[in-house]
């Protein structure tokens, strides 16, 4: 498969949406012009599935999505970039908190928000917010950071119509890169961690969109006859990431790659959970060093592979 990242993921998402009934699909210019920079291309209206272009009012977009979900309708909101979701933060925290505290007699619908994380270096001065972890922490809404074909196909199929709300987040940086086609070996029940390979010598846990760097690290280790397990990690409340912890405690050596730019990254919680299970696990972390997730900087994660390996081997 030689598709580019955005092209391939758009096909997966639009194909799933186009199979959904009782669904309201909406966003700004989602079926014309740039199709939200390609996010919403190929989405079609049919039967009980309505596609609607809406105005520039993101706070209202979020309120509508929760209202539809509470009415048993499936809502799919396409948003050009994560920055705009800050305008709906009260709904994410307060409205969703009220929904979860209420014992509804009727079945809830689903509310899926498809968006992308941008950086000033790629989009402009108002596109520097990458704090999906902060939003998830405040709201207890899961975020699935889509790295490639296999994880996107699995997450979109299982989550798009599931009752409740979730973020499906793409990387704008990866838009024109070759689509990752790593096969999945196994996955946690809540999709908090996805395992792509097994290895008894080391464990690699990739947070955010760092899976491609994890592949390179795994290759460097292989050159030294070191076999490593490889995981990608999503942002899920109360994560069931036991399969990754087990691999880390078995190998006793843990590499953590984290490009989320977040001072509250779940990578820190993961390391703590590993060490609570086995304090003898040695670990090293490579992450962006900005102190706030809104810092303006290049989005790339620079990994010193040789340096990391030398710290553990």
Image (cartoon, grey):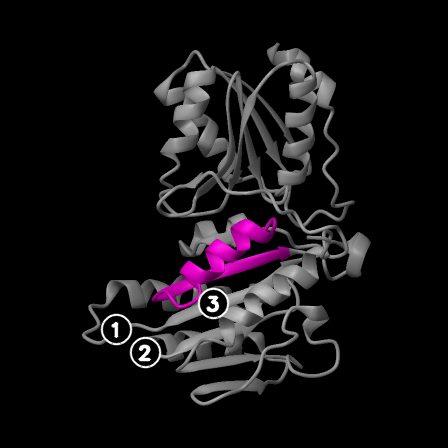
Residue underneath mark 1 = 107
Q: Horizontal and vertical percent for residue 141?
A: 42, 56
**For the point 60% across and 12% down, which residue is it?**
312
| Figure check: 308 above or below 124 | above
Per the model, the C-alpha gap separating discs 2 and 3 is: 13 Å
**In whole angstroms, how far apart are the C-alphas of marks 3 and 1?**
16 Å
Q: Percent position (x, y) of residue 148? A: 61, 50
Q: Secondary structure at mark 3?
A: strand
Crowd band around label 2 with a 10 angstrom C-alpha radius: few (<14), some (14–19), many (20+):
some
The disc label shown at residue 112, or none = 3
Q: Position of residue 124 (x, y in %)?
A: 80, 61
Task: Give the alpha-carbon distance from disc 2 to disc 1, as whole Å.
Answer: 6 Å
The residue under label 2 is 72
**Does label 2 or label 1 sit earlier along the sequence?**
2
Disc nearer the start of the sequence (2/3): 2
Quarter of the picture holding the C terminus: top right
- Residue 163 shown in magenta: yes
Outermost residue toward the bottom?
47
Closer to the camera, 276 or 125? 276
**Contact, mark 2 vs mark 1 (Cβ under 8 Å):** yes
Q: Quadrant of residue 103?
A: bottom left
Magenta residues (range): 146-170
Point 71% across, 57% down: residue: 3
Query: Local crowd at mark 1 within 10 Å, few (<14), some, or many (≥20)?
Result: few
């Amino acid at each position: 498969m030689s598709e580019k990242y955005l092209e391939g993921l758009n096909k997966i998402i639009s194909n799933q949406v186009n199979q959904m009934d009782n669904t309201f699909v909406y966003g700004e210019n989602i079926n014309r012009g740039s199709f939200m920079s390609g996010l919403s291309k190929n989405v079609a209206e049919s039967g009980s599935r309505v596609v609607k272009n809406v105005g520039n009012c993101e706070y209202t977009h979020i309120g509508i999505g929760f209202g539809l979900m509470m009415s048993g309708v499936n809502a799919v909101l396409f948003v050009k970039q994560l920055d705009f979701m800050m305008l709906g933060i009260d709904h994410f925290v307060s409205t969703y908190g009220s929904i979860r505290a209420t014992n509804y007699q009727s079945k809830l619908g689903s509310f899926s928000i498809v968006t992308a994380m941008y950086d000033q270096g790629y989009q402009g001065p108002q596109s520097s917010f990458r704090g999906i972890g902060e939003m998830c922490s405040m709201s207890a809404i899961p975020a699935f950071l889509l790295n490639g074909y296999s994880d996107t196909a699995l997450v979109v199929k299982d989550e798009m119509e599931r009752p409740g709300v979730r973020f499906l987040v793409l990387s704008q940086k990866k838009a024109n890169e070759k689509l990752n086609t790593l096969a999945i070996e196994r996955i946690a029940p809540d999709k908090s961690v996805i395992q792509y390979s097994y290895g008894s010598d080391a464990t690699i846990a990739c947070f955010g969109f760092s899976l491609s760097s994890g592949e390179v690290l795994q290759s460097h280790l292989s050159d030294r006859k070191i076999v490593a397990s490889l995981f990608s990690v999503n942002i899920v409340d109360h994560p069931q990431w036991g399969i990754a912890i087990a691999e880390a405690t078995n190998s006793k050596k843990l590499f953590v790659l984290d490009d989320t730019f977040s001072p509250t990254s779940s990578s820190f919680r993961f390391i703590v959970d590993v060490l609570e299970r086995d304090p003898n696990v040695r670990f090293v972390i490579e992450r962006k060093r900005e102190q706030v997730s809104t810092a303006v900087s290049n989005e790339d994660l620079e990994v010193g592979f040789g340096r990391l390996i030398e710290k553990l081997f």
